[in-house]
Amino acid sequence: MRPSWLIAALALLTAGLLLPGGAAIAGPQAFDLHLNVPPIVADSKAPAGCTVTYLIDDTANNDVFAARMRIASAETDSPVNNRMPCPANMPPRVGDRAMDACQSRAGDPKQCVFADMARGFEREPNINNTSEIASRCSSDKFSDIGVACWMSGKLSVCDVGCGNSPKEAVAQAQARCQEKQQHSCPVTATVPIPGP
Amino acid sequence: MDARRTAMLLMLAASQAYAQPAPTPAAPAPSSGPVKRIFLPPPVQWDNAMLNFRSALQQTATDFANLTGGLAFGMSAAQVNASLPDPYPGLSWTDLPLANEYPGEVRYFGVPLDRAGALRMNPTGCTGGTSYLVLLFTDKGLFRLSYRLIADKSCTDTNEAAQSIFARFVPITQAVVMSARYRTGNAQVVDVTDPTVAYMASVRWRQVSN
């Protein structure tokens, strides 16, 4: 017998001996393969869903909360400029829920008000002197929400603006604040409407 | 137990009748004036008719544990003490003072903020030399962290530090962690509470001037 035939025969014999023991390798290594969980695929080019962001102020310590409300789109909705539309009108319960973001975190829930304040708010700092509608911005029209304030003693008196950049949102808020309050409003802040 | 710890426990015990009590900072505004911080609670998801809502984020106790270096509500006082960088030797449940402002049996101990380890939350701004963290327990375990930032000569305003700590907890849904911030006397308080304690979550600390 030539050596190559001998090697081949030995190889076949070895394989025959090993295969029964190695058959387990052919099965799954782990049985919990999470085959029922679909992979998460994010579509980075999908139009941004609707977010309506409210600014709420805790007058006890001048904390401002950005309460972001995401509204599911209807099947018939279609994006404009890659932004899904937002409802034209917001029911009061959405504003109430936004207010809860402050009330549930404040020392006294009654100190929470919408951040767009009327002239004279410093004399009567309560929610009746604030505007829910002017305290919110929608993501279908704007990208940023801003607030501008002046200090009346220890109380921050503010108004809100919407814009398509942080700079524009702050400029809008400052213009609104200065017009309504007849004060310079140097204390400002801004956040993206959909959140960071 | 060293003198500072003893003093801390004595101070807390003396005030037992009133022992109750991130995330992301706002982007800098393009303005030359001072910039406010805007707190970001988790977003709320509404259906299209805006009739029903839920938290848009799925958060669990793990989110809280990640923030606090592994702390979880329900841990015993001994477990929490052991997790501190400099635990009190021989701390026992029956030796802890009662927090009388709460209904039922609530006990607590405090640690100076600068010895709270991961629970210090590394705030921006000054905290004052006498600021401390109170850990409150029922017989079911830890249910509240209460940060008490006291202004002093070295730090006349602890508001920035309190905001900084508060901002770390606000982005966690109230179903996992109830965070609250308020002022009493010369103290800025941030309470971080287990939401399952129901009505006890609304109890606030009131500082009493001596």
Image: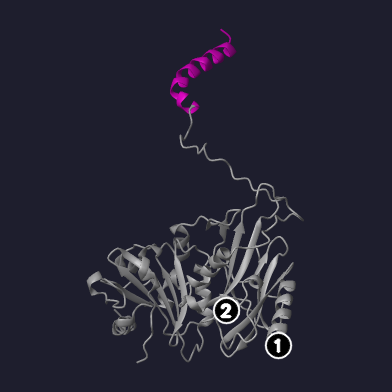
Instruction: Indicate the position of residue B94 as horizontal and vertical percent values.
Output: 22, 72
Q: Sequence order check: which comes first, mark 1 or mark 2?
A: 2
Instruction: Indicate the position of residue A195 as horizontal and vertical percent values.
Output: 63, 63
Residue B153: mark in rendering: none
User: Are marks 1 and 2 in one subunit?
Assistant: yes
Q: Chain of mark 2?
A: A
Q: Which residue is mark 2?
A: A128
Q: Which residues are magenta?
A: A1-26
Secondary structure at numbered mark 2: helix
- Residue A49 lies left or right of residue B140; in this view the side is right
Q: Which residue is mark 1?
A: A182
Q: Residues within 10 Å of mark 2 (few under 14, many from 20)?
A: few
| Residue B84, quarter of picture | bottom left
Q: Residue at x 59, y 13 (%)?
A: A4
Q: Residue B125 versus residue B166: which sits nearer the camera?
A: B166
Q: Main secondary structure of the magenta part?
A: helix
* In the image, residue A18 lies in the stretch drawn in magenta: yes
Q: Residues within 10 Å of mark 1 (few under 14, many from 20)?
A: few
Q: Residue at x 48, y 82 (%)?
A: B127
Instruction: Let me know if residue B62 appears in the view.
Output: yes
Q: As displayed, is residue B70 above or below residue B157?
A: above
* In the image, residue B181 lies in the stretch drawn in magenta: no
Measure the alpha-carbon separation of dots 1 and 2.
Answer: 20 Å
